Protein backbone atom coordinates (compact mmCIF):
# COMPACT_ATOMS: atom_id res chain seq x y z
CA UNK A 1 0.00 0.00 0.00
CA UNK A 2 2.86 2.37 0.74
CA UNK A 3 4.25 1.78 -2.69
CA UNK A 4 0.85 2.63 -4.27
CA UNK A 5 0.78 6.04 -2.58
CA UNK A 6 4.25 6.69 -3.89
CA UNK A 7 3.07 6.18 -7.45
CA UNK A 8 0.21 8.64 -7.00
CA UNK A 9 2.57 11.28 -5.62
CA UNK A 10 4.90 10.75 -8.54
CA UNK A 11 2.08 11.32 -10.99
CA UNK A 12 1.00 14.43 -9.14
CA UNK A 13 4.51 15.85 -9.34
CA UNK A 14 4.66 15.15 -13.03
CA UNK A 15 1.34 16.90 -13.60
CA UNK A 16 2.47 19.87 -11.61
CA UNK A 17 5.80 20.00 -13.36
CA UNK A 18 4.43 20.31 -16.84
CA UNK A 19 1.37 20.49 -18.89
CA UNK A 20 -0.20 17.05 -19.37
CA UNK A 21 -3.25 16.31 -21.44
CA UNK A 22 -6.32 14.89 -19.89
CA UNK A 23 -6.12 11.80 -22.03
CA UNK A 24 -2.56 11.12 -21.00
CA UNK A 25 -3.50 11.62 -17.44
CA UNK A 26 -6.35 9.19 -17.63
CA UNK A 27 -4.16 6.65 -19.37
CA UNK A 28 -1.49 6.94 -16.74
CA UNK A 29 -4.09 6.75 -14.02
CA UNK A 30 -5.51 3.53 -15.50
CA UNK A 31 -2.05 2.06 -15.80
CA UNK A 32 -1.36 2.91 -12.18
CA UNK A 33 -4.64 1.31 -11.06
CA UNK A 34 -3.86 -1.76 -13.15
CA UNK A 35 -0.42 -2.00 -11.66
CA UNK A 36 -1.87 -1.64 -8.18
CA UNK A 37 -4.34 -4.43 -8.87
CA UNK A 38 -1.57 -6.61 -10.31
CA UNK A 39 0.56 -5.89 -7.30
CA UNK A 40 -2.26 -6.91 -4.99
CA UNK A 41 -2.74 -10.14 -6.88
CA UNK A 42 0.98 -10.77 -6.85
CA UNK A 43 1.13 -10.15 -3.12
CA UNK A 44 -1.81 -12.57 -2.64
CA UNK A 45 -0.10 -15.18 -4.82
CA UNK A 46 3.12 -14.64 -2.94
CA UNK A 47 1.33 -15.13 0.35
CA UNK A 48 -0.25 -18.32 -0.98
CA UNK A 49 3.15 -19.50 -2.20
CA UNK A 50 4.59 -18.87 1.25
CA UNK A 51 1.78 -20.93 2.80
CA UNK A 52 2.39 -23.70 0.27
CA UNK A 53 6.11 -23.48 0.97
CA UNK A 54 5.47 -23.91 4.71
CA UNK A 55 3.16 -26.86 4.05
CA UNK A 56 5.74 -28.42 1.75
CA UNK A 57 8.42 -27.82 4.35
CA UNK A 58 6.29 -29.58 6.98
CA UNK A 59 5.57 -32.44 4.60
CA UNK A 60 9.26 -32.58 3.79
CA UNK A 61 10.10 -32.80 7.48
CA UNK A 62 7.51 -35.56 7.92
CA UNK A 63 8.91 -37.42 4.94
CA UNK A 64 12.37 -36.98 6.41
CA UNK A 65 11.25 -38.55 9.67
CA UNK A 66 9.54 -41.37 7.79
CA UNK A 67 12.66 -41.87 5.68
CA UNK A 68 14.77 -41.99 8.81
CA UNK A 69 12.43 -44.61 10.29
CA UNK A 70 12.56 -46.59 7.06
CA UNK A 71 16.36 -46.39 7.06
CA UNK A 72 16.44 -47.56 10.67
CA UNK A 73 14.09 -50.42 9.79
CA UNK A 74 16.26 -51.32 6.80
CA UNK A 75 19.35 -51.31 9.02
CA UNK A 76 17.56 -53.53 11.56
CA UNK A 77 16.50 -55.89 8.78
CA UNK A 78 20.07 -56.01 7.48
CA UNK A 79 21.30 -56.87 10.96
CA UNK A 80 18.61 -59.55 11.22
CA UNK A 81 19.61 -60.86 7.81
CA UNK A 82 23.27 -61.03 8.84
CA UNK A 83 22.35 -62.90 12.02
CA UNK A 84 20.04 -65.22 10.07
CA UNK A 85 22.77 -65.88 7.52
CA UNK A 86 25.21 -66.66 10.31
CA UNK A 87 22.68 -68.99 11.97
CA UNK A 88 21.96 -70.72 8.66
CA UNK A 89 25.66 -71.26 8.01
CA UNK A 90 26.09 -72.65 11.52
CA UNK A 91 23.06 -74.93 11.11
CA UNK A 92 24.29 -76.10 7.71
CA UNK A 93 27.63 -76.98 9.29
CA UNK A 94 25.94 -78.84 12.15
CA UNK A 95 23.62 -80.65 9.76
CA UNK A 96 26.53 -81.55 7.54
CA UNK A 97 28.44 -82.97 10.51
CA UNK A 98 25.36 -84.80 11.73
CA UNK A 99 24.67 -86.08 8.25
CA UNK A 100 28.15 -87.53 8.09
CA UNK A 101 27.71 -89.03 11.56
CA UNK A 102 24.26 -90.37 10.64
CA UNK A 103 25.67 -91.82 7.45
CA UNK A 104 28.36 -93.65 9.41
CA UNK A 105 25.75 -94.85 11.93
CA UNK A 106 23.48 -96.02 9.12
CA UNK A 107 26.35 -97.88 7.50
CA UNK A 108 27.22 -99.53 10.81
CA UNK A 109 23.55 -100.34 11.42
CA UNK A 110 23.27 -101.87 7.96
CA UNK A 111 26.29 -104.06 8.66
CA UNK A 112 24.70 -105.09 11.95
CA UNK A 113 21.41 -105.86 10.22
CA UNK A 114 23.21 -107.88 7.55
CA UNK A 115 25.00 -109.80 10.30
CA UNK A 116 21.73 -110.43 12.12
CA UNK A 117 20.07 -111.58 8.89
CA UNK A 118 22.89 -114.03 8.31
CA UNK A 119 22.65 -115.21 11.92
CA UNK A 120 18.88 -115.57 11.51
CA UNK A 121 19.37 -117.72 8.41
CA UNK A 122 21.88 -119.88 10.26
CA UNK A 123 19.59 -120.22 13.29
CA UNK A 124 16.61 -121.00 11.06
CA UNK A 125 18.55 -123.71 9.29
CA UNK A 126 19.77 -125.07 12.64
CA UNK A 127 16.24 -124.95 14.04
CA UNK A 128 14.85 -126.80 11.04
CA UNK A 129 17.58 -129.40 11.45
CA UNK A 130 16.83 -129.75 15.17
CA UNK A 131 13.10 -129.98 14.47
CA UNK A 132 13.70 -132.81 12.02
CA UNK A 133 15.92 -134.55 14.56
CA UNK A 134 13.31 -133.99 17.28
CA UNK A 135 10.59 -135.39 15.07
CA UNK A 136 12.77 -138.43 14.47
CA UNK A 137 13.37 -138.80 18.23
CA UNK A 138 9.66 -138.44 18.93
CA UNK A 139 8.89 -141.05 16.29
CA UNK A 140 11.47 -143.41 17.81
CA UNK A 141 10.12 -142.73 21.31
CA UNK A 142 6.61 -143.42 20.05
CA UNK A 143 7.79 -146.76 18.73
CA UNK A 144 9.41 -147.56 22.11
CA UNK A 145 6.24 -146.47 23.90
CA UNK A 146 4.08 -148.67 21.68
CA UNK A 147 6.38 -151.67 22.20
CA UNK A 148 6.35 -151.24 25.98
CA UNK A 149 2.58 -150.90 26.04
CA UNK A 150 2.26 -154.03 23.96
CA UNK A 151 4.62 -156.11 26.15
CA UNK A 152 3.24 -154.77 29.44
CA UNK A 153 -0.42 -154.92 28.46
CA UNK A 154 -1.54 -157.18 31.31
CA UNK A 155 0.35 -155.23 34.00
CA UNK A 156 -0.97 -151.94 32.61
CA UNK A 157 -4.54 -153.27 32.73
CA UNK A 158 -4.05 -154.27 36.37
CA UNK A 159 -2.65 -150.81 37.20
CA UNK A 160 0.74 -152.20 38.21
CA UNK A 161 2.61 -150.34 35.45
CA UNK A 162 1.97 -146.92 33.91
CA UNK A 163 3.83 -145.54 30.90
CA UNK A 164 3.88 -141.87 29.99
CA UNK A 165 5.53 -139.89 27.20
CA UNK A 166 5.87 -136.17 27.97
CA UNK A 167 7.89 -133.82 25.74
CA UNK A 168 10.21 -136.56 24.55
CA UNK A 169 10.74 -138.01 28.05
CA UNK A 170 9.34 -141.51 28.40
CA UNK A 171 8.69 -142.80 31.93
CA UNK A 172 7.91 -146.39 33.00
CA UNK A 173 6.40 -146.43 36.49
CA UNK A 174 6.47 -149.83 38.29
CA UNK A 175 4.77 -150.28 41.67
CA UNK A 176 6.85 -151.77 44.46
CA UNK A 177 4.99 -155.09 44.82
CA UNK A 178 5.94 -156.12 41.27
CA UNK A 179 9.66 -155.99 42.01
CA UNK A 180 10.30 -156.21 45.76
CA UNK A 181 8.94 -157.60 48.96
CA UNK A 182 8.01 -155.07 51.62
CA UNK A 183 11.09 -153.48 53.19
CA UNK A 184 13.43 -155.41 50.84
CA UNK A 185 15.71 -154.29 47.99
CA UNK A 186 16.36 -157.70 46.34
CA UNK A 187 14.44 -158.31 43.11
CA UNK A 188 11.72 -160.94 43.23
CA UNK A 189 11.58 -163.58 40.53
CA UNK A 190 8.42 -162.02 39.11
CA UNK A 191 10.13 -158.64 39.18
CA UNK A 192 13.11 -159.97 37.25
CA UNK A 193 10.76 -161.36 34.61
CA UNK A 194 9.14 -157.97 34.18
CA UNK A 195 12.50 -156.21 33.95
CA UNK A 196 13.55 -158.83 31.39
CA UNK A 197 10.76 -157.70 29.06
CA UNK A 198 11.33 -154.00 29.77
CA UNK A 199 15.10 -154.37 29.23
CA UNK A 200 14.61 -156.01 25.82
CA UNK A 201 13.06 -152.78 24.61
CA UNK A 202 15.26 -150.31 26.51
CA UNK A 203 18.53 -151.70 25.16
CA UNK A 204 17.40 -150.85 21.62
CA UNK A 205 17.00 -147.15 22.47
CA UNK A 206 20.65 -146.23 21.99
CA UNK A 207 20.25 -142.44 21.92
CA UNK A 208 18.68 -142.17 25.40
CA UNK A 209 20.00 -142.14 28.93
CA UNK A 210 18.20 -144.46 31.33
CA UNK A 211 17.66 -143.03 34.80
CA UNK A 212 16.34 -145.42 37.43
CA UNK A 213 14.60 -143.65 40.32
CA UNK A 214 13.64 -145.19 43.65
CA UNK A 215 10.67 -143.80 45.63
CA UNK A 216 9.04 -144.73 48.94
CA UNK A 217 6.11 -143.62 51.07
CA UNK A 218 6.65 -141.56 54.23
CA UNK A 219 6.39 -144.44 56.70
CA UNK A 220 9.67 -144.67 58.61
CA UNK A 221 11.87 -147.75 58.32
CA UNK A 222 11.02 -150.27 61.06
CA UNK A 223 13.61 -150.74 63.80
CA UNK A 224 14.10 -154.32 62.56
CA UNK A 225 15.39 -153.04 59.17
CA UNK A 226 17.27 -149.94 60.30
CA UNK A 227 20.55 -151.86 60.51
CA UNK A 228 20.22 -152.56 56.77
CA UNK A 229 18.54 -149.30 55.65
CA UNK A 230 18.96 -146.33 57.94
CA UNK A 231 16.08 -144.46 56.20
CA UNK A 232 13.77 -144.57 53.21
CA UNK A 233 16.49 -142.80 51.26
CA UNK A 234 18.85 -145.73 51.57
CA UNK A 235 16.02 -148.18 50.75
CA UNK A 236 14.97 -146.28 47.60
CA UNK A 237 18.58 -145.97 46.46
CA UNK A 238 19.31 -149.67 47.05
CA UNK A 239 16.26 -150.70 45.01
CA UNK A 240 17.20 -148.40 42.11
CA UNK A 241 20.77 -149.73 42.27
CA UNK A 242 19.65 -153.35 41.97
CA UNK A 243 17.45 -152.52 38.98
CA UNK A 244 20.41 -150.81 37.28
CA UNK A 245 22.66 -153.84 37.96
CA UNK A 246 20.03 -156.12 36.41
CA UNK A 247 19.76 -153.97 33.26
CA UNK A 248 23.53 -153.79 32.91
CA UNK A 249 24.42 -157.44 33.67
CA UNK A 250 21.38 -159.31 32.42
CA UNK A 251 20.38 -157.12 29.46
CA UNK A 252 23.78 -155.76 28.42
CA UNK A 253 22.85 -152.08 28.61
CA UNK A 254 26.10 -150.05 28.92
CA UNK A 255 26.72 -148.52 32.32
CA UNK A 256 27.44 -145.17 30.64
CA UNK A 257 23.75 -144.98 29.74
CA UNK A 258 22.53 -145.80 33.25
CA UNK A 259 22.15 -143.59 36.32
CA UNK A 260 20.68 -144.06 39.79
CA UNK A 261 18.55 -141.68 41.88
CA UNK A 262 17.13 -142.39 45.33
CA UNK A 263 14.41 -139.90 46.26
CA UNK A 264 13.00 -141.65 49.33
CA UNK A 265 9.61 -140.15 50.29
CA UNK A 266 10.30 -136.68 48.90
CA UNK A 267 8.61 -136.89 45.48
CA UNK A 268 5.20 -138.49 46.12
CA UNK A 269 2.65 -138.81 43.33
CA UNK A 270 -0.29 -139.47 45.68
CA UNK A 271 -1.35 -138.70 49.24
CA UNK A 272 0.42 -140.62 51.99
CA UNK A 273 -2.70 -140.36 54.17
CA UNK A 274 -4.26 -143.46 52.62
CA UNK A 275 -3.01 -147.01 52.03
CA UNK A 276 -3.79 -146.68 48.31
CA UNK A 277 -1.82 -143.45 48.03
CA UNK A 278 1.16 -144.88 49.89
CA UNK A 279 1.16 -147.93 47.61
CA UNK A 280 1.36 -145.62 44.58
CA UNK A 281 4.26 -143.71 46.11
CA UNK A 282 6.29 -146.90 46.66
CA UNK A 283 7.59 -147.31 43.13
CA UNK A 284 10.49 -147.59 40.70
CA UNK A 285 10.53 -145.19 37.78
CA UNK A 286 12.61 -145.84 34.67
CA UNK A 287 13.02 -142.58 32.78
CA UNK A 288 14.36 -142.28 29.23
CA UNK A 289 15.84 -138.85 28.53
CA UNK A 290 18.02 -137.37 25.78
CA UNK A 291 21.72 -137.62 26.61
CA UNK A 292 22.28 -133.86 26.76
CA UNK A 293 19.53 -133.50 29.37
CA UNK A 294 21.12 -135.91 31.84
CA UNK A 295 21.22 -134.18 35.25
Image (cartoon, rainbow, N blue to C red):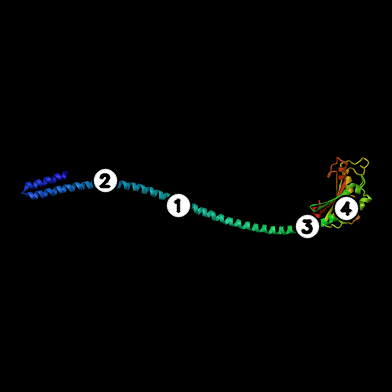
Front disc: 4 or 2: 4
Q: Is residue 177 above or below residue 100?
A: above
Q: Name the residue beneath numbered marker 2.
A: 51
Q: Name the residue beneath numbered marker 4.
A: 153
Front disc: 1 or 4: 4
Q: CA distance from mark 2 to mark 1?
A: 44 Å
Nearest to N terminus: mark 4 or mark 3: 3
Nearest to N terminus: mark 1 or mark 3: 1
Q: Position of residue 251 (x, y in %)?
A: 90, 56
For the residues bearing labels 1 and 3, Cβ distance under 8 angstroms:
no
Q: Position of residue 3 (x, y in %)?
A: 16, 45
Helix, strand or loop for disc 3: helix
Asked whether residue 253 is in view, the answer is no
Q: Position of residue 134 (x, y in %)?
A: 78, 57
Helix, strand or loop for disc 1: helix
Dot label at residue 15 = none
Q: CA distance from mark 4 to mark 2?
A: 136 Å
Q: CA distance from mark 1 to mark 3?
A: 75 Å
Q: Name the residue beneath numbered marker 1.
A: 81
Q: Is the N terminus in the top left, top right, bottom left or bottom right quadrant? A: top left
The picture quadrant where one finds residue 229 is top right
Q: CA distance from mark 2 to mark 3?
A: 115 Å
Task: Classify mark 3: residues with Cα within 10 Å, few (<14), some (14-19) or many (20+).
Answer: few
Dot label at residue 135 = 3
Task: Classify mark 2: residues with Cα within 10 Å, few (<14), some (14-19) or many (20+).
Answer: few
Choose between 104 and 67: the one closer to the eye. 67
Front disc: 2 or 1: 2
Amino acid sequence: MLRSHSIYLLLLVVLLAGCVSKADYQRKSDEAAHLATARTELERDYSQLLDQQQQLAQRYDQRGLQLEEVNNTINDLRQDQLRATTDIERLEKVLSERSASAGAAMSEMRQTIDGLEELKRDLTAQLEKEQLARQARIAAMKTTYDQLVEKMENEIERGEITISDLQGQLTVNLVEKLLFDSGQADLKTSGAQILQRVGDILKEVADKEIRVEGHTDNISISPRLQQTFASNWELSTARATNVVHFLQKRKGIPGARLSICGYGPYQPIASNDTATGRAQNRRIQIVLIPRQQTP
